[in-house]
Image (cartoon, helix red, strand yellow):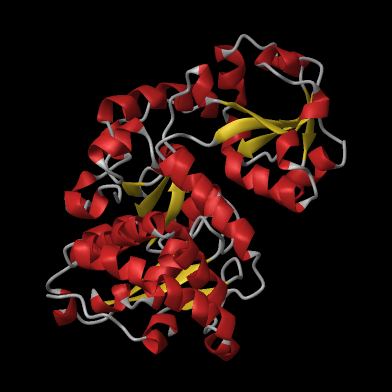
Amino acid sequence: MKFRAPDCAQFIAPRCFYSTSRIGTPLAMPTSVHNKGNDMHKITSSRRAFLQVALAAPFVMKAGRSLAATPVKFSFSAPFDGSNAMYLMADQMGWYKEAGLECQFDAGGGSGEAATRTGSGVYDGGTVDINNVAEFNSKNPTAEIRAVYMAYFKSPLCVASLAKSGINKPSDLAGKTIGAAAPDGAYRLFSTYAKTTSIDAAAVKWNMVGLQLREAVLAGGSADAILGFDSTMYFGLVKAGIASADIKFMYYADAGLDLYGNAIVLSKKFRTTNPEAAKAFVAVSARAYQASMADPKATIAALKAFQPLINADLEEEKLRWLIKNQFTTPETQKNGLGSVDSARLSKSMEAVAAGFGLPSVPKAEDLFDPSFLPSAELRKLPA
């Protein structure tokens, strides 16, 4: 099947329902979004680059049009932002619909929430840190959620501080106050990070807050450092008025915790009862990741068309951050996005089991299912 280039009206037409609620009634995209002339110009001006990627890649699923429209309910681990704009772009381009899918994309409040939504069966899938998958499956063995497409190949878990805090190496955290959210993976794995870097964890003071307040306690001086994803904390601090040059990171990965990060995760029900639709969803999403890397500006224009109040420049910077730091690594340059190194994943689970207090070390095959991966052409990094 050949790709049919959509006209501009088709490009911005909504193909799925969206909701910014945690779990609620899906909302149709506001009509006013269709009339945003400036956004229309942004989309049109970058359309050529998208089409080049779309035409270069084999079409997602030849049998897609023969399928009855299959509903797919998918949860992001974050609000609508640069980290998930590629899904909205692909939806506005009509790629999911052409593969026989009718999608609902909902914003989320963290990776743990997306794992719970997917594991409960209320959602067919979500973007989830694979380390949260390990913990969720350990506590809910019958749920059997699986990662099927890896997106973050370097874990973004880190310690963030400001230059004035004087934190330049892990040992400088002794006697300092760290802000963290109890459910967050960075906090849950801090004991392992402390052990790896020979930090006396008992010498650290804690300011436990919700995820929404984490950056505020650092910006406001109530903490000397905070824990979390690098991009989330960085852009939260920038929004709070902190100069980018004043923000510093110490990565768990640099301490030897070679962890994978966010992946597309699917529920047991979706994988087993409708595997062809599941494969089609992953293939379209892989195509969307390629397109977002080829043209971040056009990807954020699609997000802006859906969410007019976002700061497009900031969200584009966030997407470019992810492309540089999480999507592009020696591993992905060699093998493309999506797949994982089973030996690396198995080794990382030793640290995860220790940090999360799991009764046993999760096996790689119980976390990642490669049978849903699309072709290598759809997974390779754009030139």
Q: Residue at x 73, y 45 (%)?
A: 237
* Front in this rendered view, residue 262 or 120: 262
* Front in this rendered view, residue 299 or 383: 383
Residue 100 lies, in percent from the top left, at 24, 77
Q: Residue at x 46, y 22 (%)?
A: 351
Label tally: 0
Tell me if residue 334 comes above or below residue 69 in the rendering.
above
Residue 7 quadrant:
bottom left
Residue 234 visible, this orientation: yes
Tell me if residue 363 comes above or below residue 126 in the rendering.
above
Instruction: Residue at the far right: name it.
Output: 221
Asked if residue 65 lies left or right of residue 254, the reply is left
Asked if residue 283 lies left or right of residue 27, the reply is left
Residue 14 visible, this orientation: no
Asked if residue 156 lies left or right of residue 58, the reply is right
Tell me if residue 173 comes above or below residue 263 in the rendering.
above
* Front in this rendered view, residue 255 or 184: 255
Residue 293 lies, in percent from the top left, at 39, 54
Q: Residue at x 33, y 78 (%)?
A: 94
Residue 265 lies, in percent from the top left, at 37, 52
Q: Which quadrant would the N terminus be assigned to in this image? A: bottom left
Tell me if residue 104 comes above or below residue 346 in the rendering.
below
* Front in this rendered view, residue 325 or 358: 325
Instruction: Residue at the far top: name it.
Output: 198
Q: Residue at x 67, y 72 (%)?
A: 309
Residue 109 lies, in percent from the top left, at 60, 56
